[in-house]
Amino acid sequence: MTTSNNPIISGSFSYETLEETLDVKAKMADLFIGMPKETAFQENRIALIPEAVGVLVANGHDVWVESGAGLQSGYTDHDYSEAGAKIKYQKAEIFDCDILLKSAPLVHEDLPLLKLNHTIISPIHLSAMKAEILASMMEKKITALSFENLKDDSGTYPIVRSMSEIAGSAAMLIAGYYLGQAGHGKGILLGGISGIPPTKVIILGAGVVGEFAARAALAMGSSVKVFDSSVYRLKRLQDTMGHRVWTSVMEPRILAKQLKTCEVAVGALGSQNGRTPVVATEAMVAAMRPGSVIIDVSIDRGGCFETSRITSHEVPTYLAYDVIHYCVPNIPSGFSRTASHAISNVIMPLLLNISDAGGFDAYVWNNFNIRTGIYMFKGALTNFHLSERFELKYTDLNLLMASMG
């Protein structure tokens, strides 16, 4: 007897197609955002302009603004109220919000107002950070994201770049003012006109600040010479400028010779960690022409001229060897409306992305670029340089996220 291998079909069977299973999109999170008025660091900027607040409110988020927070950037309480923000008159009320947007770092006066599990998006200003501020933030399990280390999808630092572009362009406007009679200078027009040799500008650093300073100087008709320790950065500058620019590596004798005959010197050197290197010595500055102008944009990390010392927007200059020194550490704050708009262009889309992801934690889990900007996560210090400097416990953010997964 042979057995049949044919399938048995019964009328009692029913066949149905299976539904395709798709990932369920996370429910959008409603954000509760507060912007306090800044009282320190000569800060005039604000993290969101009224137009950006209007977009956030239209997407269902609550935005509270402390009265007067936008005045230094030219935005009134009425502007924010019309955009849908709630105006609050006590700083403590703003600190009731889940997410705090600050255009200056936390200061001691803010610490008693911090709540457990606050999320803070602000600059960090490594040179001004204090151990007790970090310790208090860790105790209250704060999550903190810094402007300086915030990366976008292209792998660049959008806020740092925008502020560098402003600082570079502004440096030449400032130099032009202090060369003129109104700025107690020699009465020289920055640039050049027919029949008169162009103003000579020396730029130390071929990064973003140096590039935009060079662009502004060339546009005014100046003669521009750029120094940098990196041949690669000098080549990149040549490519992005679109035409040949006089460049040199940091050779002391060549630098001293060029500084001796220039009208304007711009310090635009960057530093990834620690202090900016001093490349222009006191002797080099002493040999410069009386009435020439130094704009040390690098002063927030110590400055690259040996004679540089920090000044303020109220008293921005001093004389050393008859050379005018302008050493204000936060130049973009002097152009606060433009700077605020630039910051807002980055922060507003970031907040919308956080909401779309279902909240800050979910966004950090799914987005690796944002992790570079986080220096504290739920009270764990995730920035190695801060932990080393202040001898505080370091936690790797990627391992922390993996343990929470």
Image (tube, rainbow, N blue to C red):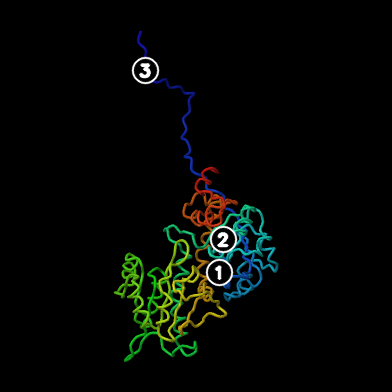
Nearer to us: label 3 or label 1: 1
Tell me the crowding category of disc 1: few under 14, some 14 to 19, or many 20 or more residues within 10 angstroms, Cα based. some
Q: CA distance from mark 1 to mark 2?
A: 19 Å
The residue nearer to you, when weighing 350 against 382, is: 382
Disc marking residue 265:
none
The x, y position of residue 203, in whole percent, is 39, 75
The residue nearer to you, when weighing 80 against 40, is: 40
Residue at screen point 31% across, 69% down: 239
First in sequence, mark 2 or 3: give its number: 3
Residue at the bottom extreme? 195
Specify the amino acid type for callout 3.
Answer: Asn
The x, y position of residue 331, in whole percent, is 50, 74
Specify the amino acid type for callout 1.
Answer: Glu
Q: Which residue is mark 1?
A: 51
SS class of the residue under badge 3?
A: loop
The x, y position of residue 313, in whole percent, is 55, 78
* Cβ–Cβ under 8 Å for marks 3 and 1: no
Disc marking residue 5:
3
Nearer to us: label 2 or label 3: 2
Q: Which residue is mark 2?
A: 121
In the picture shown, does residue 276 fall above or below 194? above
Q: CA distance from mark 2 to mark 3?
A: 70 Å
Q: Quadrant of residue 108?
A: bottom right
Nearer to us: label 1 or label 2: 2
